Amino acid sequence: MFKYLDKYVEYETIGRGSYGSAHLVRSKSDQQVYVAKKIQLFNLKSKEQDDSKREVMLLQKLKHPHIVQYIESFNENDTLIIIMEYCEEGDLSFHINRMSQRKEYFPEQIILNWFLQCALALKYIHEQKILHRDIKSQNIFLSSNGFVKIGDFGISRVLEHTQDQANTVVGTPYYMSPEVCENKPYTYKSDVWSLGCVLYELCNLSHAFKSNNLLGLVNRIVKEQASAIPSHYSKELADLINKLLIKNADQRPHTSEIFNFPLIRNTMQQFV
Ligand code: ADP
Ligand code: MG
């Protein structure tokens, strides 16, 4: 059993993956709820174990209002446990599906406000010379104060290793950039592409690029334009999405350039 250094009490399981599981825990000292991720280290080679520890240390240095805060991590029973902030309102993917079921669309102002918060987080991450590598609506969370926070990050690399080992099928890579599809290196611009896919998804309530097989998906990402977003959204918003989804990474805006768009500048002025 896990004792969580005698500091936390586990009371609910919220997810299970090939890497391990995610739980809600309550801190004994301040009674606050946190998320605990358990990553089974026996799946990892010793170099990967070292990598994962280094990565977690790096994550603990990150502090930003729009990034899910890592609290601490420790080892118990050959399992790496990461304690992080709990975002009560779930992930964006859940909210997108709910809107889609209700046949409603998010108001443009909400979309821009959420997007701005994500862009601020991504700018901060990139300024630390870190790539997220797994930006998607399932990894962007809403907290009860209405803040949007990018999460599940960095550990994605650790989890990839366990998934290799377990030989499990990784989810369809809807957010993969054209350059990554073409086996070129992952760069900051690849994160920008993925954020563009999230913005598209918030407008259209469906993925920008989809197919029922990997080859079909890669082909679409590399060659095809995503279909237009609903016409009730502004031309400026449609234009921003088109820029973020420019196939050629060199022509795609850098993270800091996102803030030069008048639409985003205006949103920022309303935000502060
Ligand atoms: P996966 O990403 O493979 O679903 P995770 O362990 O990352 O597995 O997450 C399990 C579940 O817990 C998901 O539904 C996810 O949305 C949710 N979750 C993960 N981290 C948080 C968090 N910090 N706050 C709230 N919910 C979270
Ligand atoms: Mg996740």
Image (cartoon, rainbow, N blue to C red):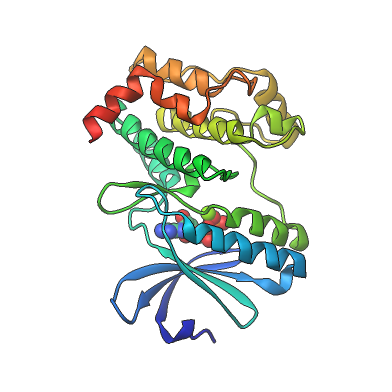
Residue at the (68%, 62%) spot, across then down: 51
216 sits to left or right of 228: right
The image quadrant where one finds the C terminus is top left
Q: In the rendered view, would you say 141 is above or below 29?
A: above
Residue 261 occupies quadrant: top left
Residue 44 lies, in percent from the top left, at 73, 67
Q: Quadrant of residue 58?
A: bottom right
Quadrant location of the N terminus in the rendered image: bottom right
Q: Position of residue 197 (x, y in %)?
A: 52, 31
Q: What residue is shown at x 22% (from left), y 30% (from top)?
A: 270
Tag count: 0
Q: From the top left corner, tell me how far across and down residue 48 is, in percent.
A: 72, 64
| 243 displayed left or right of 26 | right
Who is closer to the viewer here, 99 or 88?
88
Mark yes or no: residue 2 visible.
yes
Q: Is residue 225 left or right of residue 163?
A: left
Which residue: 39% across, 62% down? 85
Q: Furthest-top residue in view?
A: 235
Give the camera-side residue of 233 and 187: 187
| Residue drawn at point x = 72 percent, y = 25 percent | 219
Residue 113 lies, in percent from the top left, at 31, 34
Residue 208 occupies quadrant? top right
Q: Is residue 19 visible?
A: no
Question: Is 117 above or below relative to 34?
Answer: above
